[in-house]
Image (spheres, rainbow, N blue to C red):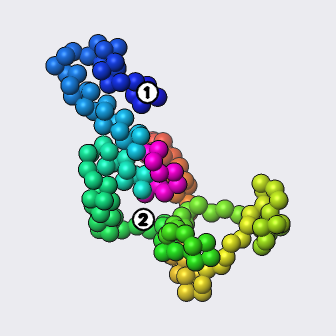
Amino acid sequence: MWASRSDPDLICAELDIPEKESKKVKKNLSAFKSALTALDKVEHDSFQRLVEFRSALDGMDCKTHREALLAQAKDEQLPEDVFLLPNLPQLEVQPAVILMREILAIPFASVCFRSLDAVTADMFLRVGTLVPTIKYAVSQSFGALYSRIGLPKEYETRRDESIVLFDISA
């Protein structure tokens, strides 16, 4: 990307940005370039990448920015079609999210219980099971979502778009 490779002075010169406006453009380009560089520091943790990116853009300390984002997230409610798993003990990973509208059917024959059996790309390795309390909570949440709305979001969107097409005055 041009903005990440080139110097802000060179970009302003190539775009013929007037001198009185170039200071602001250079400042923004420098911040954006720093933010892109910050993204490369962290590979896998999406939240930490967001913190690094926004901290570089705003010129804030990462720790301060992380605390502000976490405080903001605590005040927000999760969408009704999202179920948060605080942890997955079998994998020893950070929290995971179940997207209730993302239903995926996997043939039982494609599910493997040992890593040695998962030899092709169309095989899925089962890494654990949910404890009964969580399993029932997920089922309850899934049932509540689909019993209330009844149909997938895509259908509701297409339905609403189609209703607009009907000429009620005729």
In the image, residue 166 sits, relative to residue 69, either above or below, namely above
Q: Using the image as rendered, state which of residue 118 and residue 38 is in the foreground.
A: 38
Task: Please identify, in this view, whether the residue under mark 2 or under mark 1 is nearer the observer.
Answer: 1
Q: Mark 1 points at which residue?
A: 5
Instruction: From the viewer's perspective, tell me whether residue 60 is left or right of residue 132.
Output: left
Q: Pinpoint residue 159: horizontal percent, then vertical percent.
A: 52, 52
- The residue to which callout 2 is attached is 79
Q: In this view, does 90 lie above or below 4?
A: below
Give residue 137's position: percent from left, percent from top.
53, 81
The span picked out in magenta is: 39-47
**Which residue is at a point 62% across and 63% down the rendered structure image?**
103
Residue at the limit of the structure toward the bottom, as seen here: 132
SS class, disc 2: loop
x 26%, y 45%: residue: 59
Type of amino acid at the residue the image marks with label 1: Arg
Work out how far the residue at label 2 is from the one at label 1, CA to CA, in angstroms.
39 Å
Q: Residue 29 lies in magenta, yes or no? A: no
Q: Quadrant for residue 90, please give it.
A: bottom right
